[in-house]
Amino acid sequence: MWFRTDSETVAVRVSLTGPPSMDQMAGTGQCGMDAYVGDWGAQRYWGTARPVLGSAEYSAVLFRAVGRQDRTVCLNLPLYVGVRELQVGLDPDATVTAAPPFEHPGRVVIYGTSITHGGCASRPGAAYPALLSRRLRQEVLNLGFAGNSKGDAEVAHILGELEDVACYVLDYETNVLEVEPLRETLTAFIPILREARPGVPILVVTKPALARGLRDPGYRATTLERRDLQREIVDRHRAAGDTDVHFLDLTDLDIAEATVDGVHPSDLGFVQLADAIEPSLRRLLGH
């Protein structure tokens, strides 16, 4: 959520659907909030609201600034636990107005896995969709669904109904590890999006190199087979005249050292992913 205020203090009172409970993800990422302050393109991290272990409710001061002045504030909500109620506390005499529009119009819609979702970022603003939004100065809609992004046609229809889409990113391979189901879903998914949103760029992204691929040649071979399949499907669309379908190969992006459990990135891993995806998005969005 974004707003503009001259308050020197920003605090939150949060009621969640559950307490911190994950064994591989920091509670600040699963249930906490963080604040970024500044105009688009100049946002800086200012503070984290830390949840209370064993509790679904907490109150915290995100930051105290010195000096009264208008600031654009972005509050990133918890990544893995729902918010039942959120109250934002400001100085009693503070002003609050709407945040300015993003510098670039339209939304980047990323459909992906638990990695897109944000596991295992140490805080919400460290997930790669949030990183990309700050860098691109554009709204990024995070549609990562941990373990549940299977490329279902019904989801493609829903994504096609979204308004004001500047680009689609399909990053769901990690949830469809067998080649034939990936072939079936991606072959159907792209045409559904294209029929709904002619001319909107679609970027198909492969999974990066994870720890298992470094130790298991068979797994690595299957990863490369899925990569080739996705490239083949994209090339087929482009050969048929749809040059707004694009492919980004991340199979050689080694983030194994920058993961928490061999699969889910640490904050460093999310920076590596954002660094790898950002140039393609800038090109497709005309930045």
Image: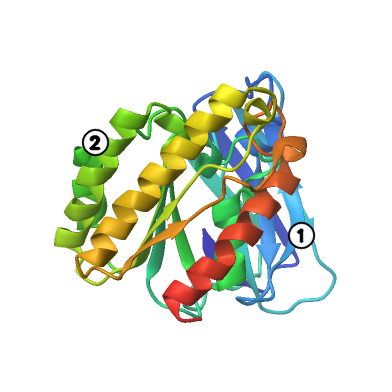
Q: Which residue is mark 2?
A: 184
The residue at the point 82 percent across, 75 percent down is 67
Amino acid residing under circle 2: Glu
- The picture quadrant where one finds residue 244 is bottom left
The picture places residue 30, in percent across and down from the top left corner, at 61, 33
- The picture quadrant where one finds residue 225 is top left
The picture places residue 16, in percent across and down from the top left corner, at 53, 31
Of badges 1 and 2, the one in the foreground is: 2
Around disc 2, counting alpha carbons within 10 Å, would you say few (fewer than 14), some (14 to 19), or many (20 or more)?
Answer: few
Most extreme residue toward the right is: 66
The picture places residue 140, in percent across and down from the top left corner, at 47, 60
Is disc 2 placed on a helix, strand or loop?
A: helix
Q: Are marks 1 and 2 in contact (CB under 8 Å)?
A: no
Q: Nearer the viewer, residue 103 or 187?
A: 187
Q: Is residue 238 toward the left or the right of residue 82 in the image?
A: left
The residue at the point 34 percent across, 50 percent down is 232
Q: Earlier in the sequence, mark 1 or mark 2?
A: 1
Amino acid residing under circle 1: Trp
Q: Is 268 rendered above or below residue 175?
A: below
Q: Is 39 rendered above or below residue 118?
A: below
Q: Is residue 141 toward the left or the right of residue 27 in the image?
A: left
Is disc 1 placed on a helix, strand or loop?
A: strand
Whether residue 220 is visible = yes
Q: Is 74 rendered above or below residue 125?
A: below
Q: Is residue 230 toward the left or the right of residue 42 in the image?
A: left
The residue at the point 65 percent across, 60 percent down is 275
Q: Is residue 203 toward the left or the right of residue 207 in the image?
A: left
Q: Which residue is mark 1?
A: 46
Question: How many numbered circles are shown?
Answer: 2
The picture places residue 185, in percent across and down from the top left corner, at 26, 38
- The picture quadrant where one finds residue 22 is top right
